[in-house]
Amino acid sequence: MIVRFACVLTVFLSLATAALGGELRGTGDLGLIVERATGAVQIIETTGRTSLGRVAGLGDLSHASAVFSRDGRYAYLFGRDGGLSKIDLLERKLVKRIIQAGNSIGGAISDDGRLVAVSNYKPGGVRIFDAGTLEPVAEIPATWGTAGERSKVVGLVDAPGRRFVFTLYDAGEIWIAQIPENGTPKVTKLTGAGKLPYDGLITPDGRYYVAGLFGEDGLALVDLWQDTPKITRILDKYGRGEKKLPVYKMPHLEGWARAGEKLFLPAVGRHELLIADARTFREIGRVAVHGQPVFAVARPDGRQVWVNFAHPLNDTVQVIDTQSGKVIKQFTPGKAVLHLEFTPRGEQVWISVRDANRVDIYDTRTMKRLSTLKVESPSGIFFTARANRLGL
Amino acid sequence: MKTLWLVMASLLIAGLATVASLAGGNLTPERRDALVHLVRQDCGSCHGMTLKGGLGRPLLPDNLATRSEADLAGVILDGVPGTPMPPWRGLLEPDEAMWIARKLKSGFPQ
């Protein structure tokens, strides 16, 4: 009898583990790579640097981005076509997909892991869903002005206390929305952010929200620790009237490239990174770089900042040593380097090279290429370590 | 008289060549493929890969019905001041901009 029970138990357990790809595993080294042209993602792991599988049928993934559930098991993928997909990284399958708007740009997950918010261009605003079921929870239309127009929403991030912070592109406003357990969202609207704010970020401590401006030199800063938050302008007029160079791709503000007391930010219309003092937000220097920077991402220890560039100089990556403020390495991985992502402790960086259909993996100390994955038209790369970081 | 005819004939040929060139008639198939890729992928970063719009306006035939090809080619080459639309002159030739404009109006190739 006992033998028989043991047999049944063994069969049951092996069936259960088979569903998880044959073995038990954690999620801390998992991630996904967006295949922007095919509407699919590859699920990868960074320990052996391999692809574990592919999930397709995810719609228009140009400019797609992802956030993760706090257990690192599920990815929420935000597509350009308004699609919101929940993907199980362990079972490597689509759990649920909804079309929640006509045209979208990104999303965030709340600090308690229970809400997923999406920022929409059409209809302009933010929609909030239950992270478990993807059922709608709340909607915040980005209505502004006297005629009741709706603004495109950019720079959506999570903030502590079930809050989301986002920027109205057309209106030049920054809104802070608190989502109660029951009842309607409480929205604080801050006006006068500046002309054409194109993206936003929140500092890893959840204190400062920063929106980058396309229409004028400078950035809008909000100190969320204040009882009555207000917008202040930082790095004002950093161009000092210099003629702007054309920008063939908008920069991104993702995370906060911070190294000790220095912050590194892409300038707009200039082939430079701005260096600001992290306490005063005053400009303390610049680094001349190869082209219009798109992403300027600090290695998790802050010692290096890796930068990619806009079309037509997008075949290059530069590495800046944050102590000397100098470019210490330049690579040419191939045409259309779109994104880069560090492993949680920064020993590897993964770089998507869209037109070469490759993701290259580098050792960030030796700067040597460790390996390459074949991925069709790769763009965003997202690792589950983001699950444990505010604003990502 | 003979000279005048020669001049007129060469002007006519030159004129026809310009028309053909402005319409993108001289573009090689490889260059056309490269332009399709550029529009879908790089213009697509603002206008969407399906050209349905993003931070930039939608560029589907319905959205462009009231704009002439020359007008659109001008926007491509010189940008729209005060907006993020940059001038592509220097990266694109006038005949390439005309070809893109015509294809956008009639339904852009995949």
Image (cartoon, rainbow, N blue to C red):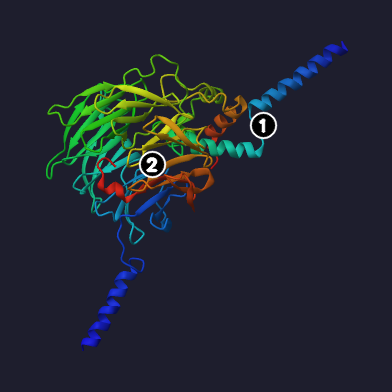
Left or right: A212 in relation to A245: left
Residue A243 picture location, percent across and down:
45, 16
Rendered view: A21 above or below A315: below
SS under mark 2:
loop
Q: Which residue is mark 2?
A: A80
Left or right: A230 in relation to A383: left
Report in which chain the residue with disc 1 lies.
B
Image quarter where the C terminus of chain A lies is: top left
Report in which chain the residue with disc 2 lies.
A
Task: Please say whether residue A387 is visible from this viewpoint.
Answer: yes
Residue at the (53%, 46%) spot, across then down: A356
Left or right: A183 in relation to A138: left
Residue at the (34%, 39%) spot, across then down: A104
Rendered view: B23 above or below A4: above
Closer mark to the observer between disc 1 and disc 2? 2
Kind of residue at badge 2: Arg
Looking at the image, the residue that sits furthest to the right is: B2
Q: Residues within 10 Å of mark 2 (few under 14, many from 20)?
A: many
Q: Which residue is mark 1?
A: B25
Residue at the (67%, 24%) spot, across then down: B19
Residue B48 picture location, percent across and down:
44, 37
Task: Please say whether residue A375 is visible from this viewpoint.
Answer: no
